[in-house]
Each structure stands twice: as structure tokens, then as C-alpha cells.
Amino acid sequence: MIGERIKRARAAAGLSMQALGEQVGISANMVKKYEHDQSMPSSGVLLKLATALSVRTEYFFRPAQVTLGEVEYRKKASASAKLLKKIESDVVDQAERWLSLKNVWPNFPIASFNYQPDVPVVSTLDAVEQVAAKVRTDWQLGMNPLPDLIDLLESKGILVIVSNVPQADKFDGLQAKISGQPIVVVSSHWPGCRQRFTLAHELGHLVLHGLLDESLDEEMACNRFASAFLLPEVGLFQHLGERRSNVDPKELYFLKHEYGLSMAACLYRSADLGVITEEKKRQIFIQFSKNGWRKQEPGNPYPQEQTLLFEQLVYRALAEGIVSESKAAELLQMSVMALHKQRQMLAEAV
């Protein structure tokens, strides 16, 4: 048990056995023995391991084991196996704490995701557009901008994990399941518009599962779903009109900050709905490339999204007497003293 946890935490930290051993003051061979459960670290070594791996000592003894089921990565070609391992280790650690919290509740207050739109087989991108509109209608969202996508997905039974693993530009998202509950992973290093598109894209996978005709590319369909879900047709027409010979980049910037969709995605959306021609889209993208906007769009980035659901449920369980302070501190990865200050709404000591 401890060996597997050391191995997982080392992967998450991106350390070799040699590097970890040097930080702890032991040999790489001893690290190997620990990871294969051929030897048990002393309490002193365990404390050093926890410090080097940035985990609490309770991590090594946590009983819950999580296996990610149906893992689907959206990754760029430059994403290394080492990076994906770090991401997966981080996700498994957070998922284990989710499952540990879920298991202490007599009736877990988060519903399971069970939405399936009543539509025929989806065989065109226009039909995908209609599915996105139906989801908004079924969930009573109207056609206005969605201010908090993470909160919306979590209210529908989709857990969202925000990973702090760096090198986010080489990773586009992950969807998996834990105990049958879907989870979507985004990075804390992305701008908000990229987080939102990934969240909406992964929602598209869940909603369109089993509905797509074989002739339709699933990734393309989910991209169209994400754009339509975040920026409905009526919103685009209201702001840009139905037919234009050109659009100004500043218009795309305003759309981005109203709907939480990148300028590039708004440009694609404009061409998808026929507001501008494909040729005009191509010309504008050429200008984007010359200005360096394909890598970093101009102006202020769209604010990042945050998830507070896990912390909220821990404090709720604490208030209801479902968990003790020590258990809550373990779940929140802080000391009991720090938790006590948090509960009393006291500032941290300087």
C-alpha cells in the first residue's frame, strides 16, 4: 500500500528515484525497495518523503484506492508520457479524496449524471447545434451567457477537478469516471476561456455518447457542441448580425468577455453560422498569426473558473457531525490548527 503511494506521489512530483533519494537522504535503490514494498520506511524517513513529495503523511496510509475508468485524454502531440503520468497521479489523488468524502455520507448530496437528450441519431454538425440548444432548454438555461460553467456541471453530477500540474500548453483535458461518476479535468494554468471550452467539449462527449452517426467525427462534433453551448446562434446574431463582409477583432474581444469563448473560437463560430465566409475567416486568422494572437490573445484574459464544491461539502459534513476535524483536515490537506482557524474565519498568522 505505502509503496504504491510513494510511487504515485513521485510520478506526480516528476522525480526520478535518484532525485527523490537525494532529497530524502537515501539511495535510489532504497526508494525502489519502498515502492515495491520490500522495505518499510521509518517514521523519520516517511516525514522526509512527505516533505519532498509535497503530501501529508496521512496520504501514505489513506485506505481508499481509486481506479480511473474510461479515461479519455485530449492531448497535444507534444504531451509526453511523463507529463500524462503526472496529471493522472494528481487526478487520482484528488479523486481518492472525493471518494473518501463520498463514502462518509449516508446520502451523498450530489446527484449522478444521467442526462440523455431525447433526439434521433445525430448525423450532421447542424444537428449537433440543435442538441446543444436542447440541453440549454432542458436545463432551463435560456440563451444568455453562462457565468459559471464549473458550478453548472457540478450541479448536474459531473465532478470537476482542477489540476495544478504545470506545462498546461501540452495538455487539453481529460475525462474519466470514478465509481461511475463522470469527472472532467482542466488545468489551473489555462485562461478561463480555454477551461470553459474544454468543459463544454467534455460535456459534449457525455451528451452525444451513443448518438453520433459513424460518418461524423466525434472530436469535431464535440467542438461544435462546445461552441454552440457557450455561444448560442441567437447571441452571435444579436451581436454581429447574420451576414457580414468582415468583423473587427475588437468585436471578437467583446464576445469573448461576454460569453467566455476565445476570440479564435468566436471567429470559427462566425464562419460556422455563415456570418462571414470561410475565406474571410482564413484571412482574419492570417492576421491573428502575424500579430501572435494564435498563441496569446490580446487584452485581458478571461477570468479562470474555480471549483469550491469539494471544500463546501467537507465543511458541510463537519457542521453536520459526519466527519471529525482531523478527518476534515486530512481531506483538505491542511493541519487541524489551520482548519480551526479557517472555521473561525481568522487570518493566518504572519
Image (cartoon, rainbow, N blue to C red):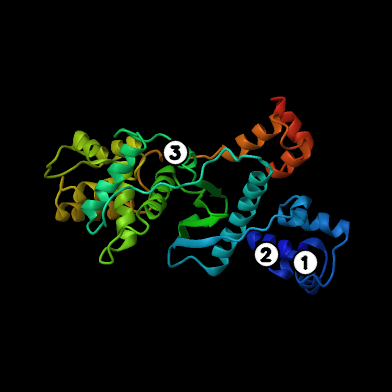
Residue 212 on image: x %, y %: 30, 60
Q: Does residue 188 appear in the picture of this structure?
A: no
Which quadrant of the figure has residue 66?
bottom right
Circle 2 residues within 10 Å: few <14, some 14–19, many ≥20: some
Could you give the CA–CA distance between mark 2 and mark 1, rounded to whole angstroms? 9 Å
Q: Nearer the viewer, residue 105 or 76?
A: 105
Pick the front one: 156 or 245: 156
Amino acid found under the numbered disc labelled 2:
Leu
Q: Quadrant of the image for the C terminus?
A: top right
Q: Residues within 10 Å of mark 1 (few under 14, many from 20)?
A: some
The residue closer to the viewer here, 44 or 219, is 219
Determine the image quadrant of residue 320.
top right
From this viewpoint, is residue 66 visible?
Answer: yes
Residue beneath disc 2 = 15
Q: CA distance from mark 1 to mark 3?
A: 44 Å
In the image, what residue occupies the spot 29% across and 38% down? 255
Which mark lies nearer to you, 2 or 3? Answer: 3
Task: Name the secondary structure under disc 1.
Answer: helix
The answer to whether marks 1 and 3 mark residues whose Cβ atoms lie closer than 8 Å is no
**Residue 152, labelled with which disc?**
3
